[in-house]
Amino acid sequence: MIALSANDSSALRSLVRKINPPLDFVKVALEREIDSQLQSARALRPVLLHGCGDLWRIGMAILPDLERLKRWIAVSNTPYLSVHLDVQPEDMAHLTPGAALERIAINIEALREATGLEVALENVAHYAWSERPRFITDPSWIEAALEMTQAPLVLDIAHARVSADHRGDNAEEYMAALPLEKTIELHLSAPRMEADGLRDRHLPLSEAEFDWLEWVLVRAKPQTMTLEYAGIPDLGHTADGREIRIPRNDPSRLLENLAQLDTLRKRLAGQLRQATRLPQGWHIDQRRAPNREEELSIGSIRAMGY
């Protein structure tokens, strides 16, 4: 059965304190000094590490502090390391598709040698105004990067949809051109259409996202699905730098999406529950009246047929 993961967040931790959500891993992004966060996340579940370190990219000339990275790996018990398939103009004096592939291949091999782990590469989002070169999101270039490095793909479906929108491509044709058969993990969240085009906003999954997910699962056989709702600040920015509020840390919505994904993976594995009931381990303390958050959560679960 496909493993289920979710972003580390206060919303997730509040759920784990009250109930036992269907969750195999907690995903922790290595973007800052996160020793204490990593230890507390590991107390919840095994951890999936995502990223190389403090805002490092796989296309940079110098790899992150590998000793620190190895310490994080030992604490996390992560089965593999995943990083964005990304190179920025500031990383290389002469940024061409071929030079970018060579740099990435060298760095992937160095990470493997240092950590003893497989390194998976995640497709990034292309925006019309971004300095990120367009070729980074070309399906043929992504496939060449996976072939040269012999790395599996972390397919971020929202990133792919955003890229298609800003590239002017048909979303289904763009997604179909990606090397889906090499997918080891799926990143799942809802993008949002805004005045400047589709944006990767890490919103909760709606019906459209589940349609895309089932479309992908016909063509890919991932080991893990990671829900990326929650764990992201509620503030975002427009293309011109204005700050906007984006609510995306509601525990009840997080639980609803986890339950939906759990239902989907059990259906795919032929393990659907027969009875309409709360799943074992999802008990909420009945010695007190449930608060609004819990009422929403219970309603969400029951509405899905548990």
Image: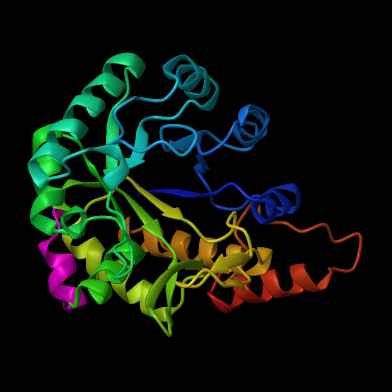
User: Residue at position x 37%, y 72% from top?
Assistant: 210
User: Residue at position x 13%, y 66% from top?
Assistant: 176
Among the 4 quarters of the image, the one containing residue 34: top right
User: Residue at position x 15%, y 56% from top?
Assistant: 135
Task: Tell which of 108 and 291 is nearer to you.
Answer: 108
Against 14, residue 32 (above or below) is above
Task: Tell which of 62 and 176 is nearer to you.
Answer: 62
Task: Tell which of 180 and 165 is nearer to you.
Answer: 165
Task: Tell which of 9 and 216 is nearer to you.
Answer: 9
Against 156, residue 175 (above or below) is below
**Residue 266 appears left or right of 23:** left
Residue 274 visible in image: no
Q: Which residues are magenta?
A: 169-179
The residue at the far right in this view is 288
Q: Position of residue 295 (x, y in %)?
A: 75, 73
Magenta stretch encompasses residue 172? yes
**Residue 34 appears left or right of 93:** right
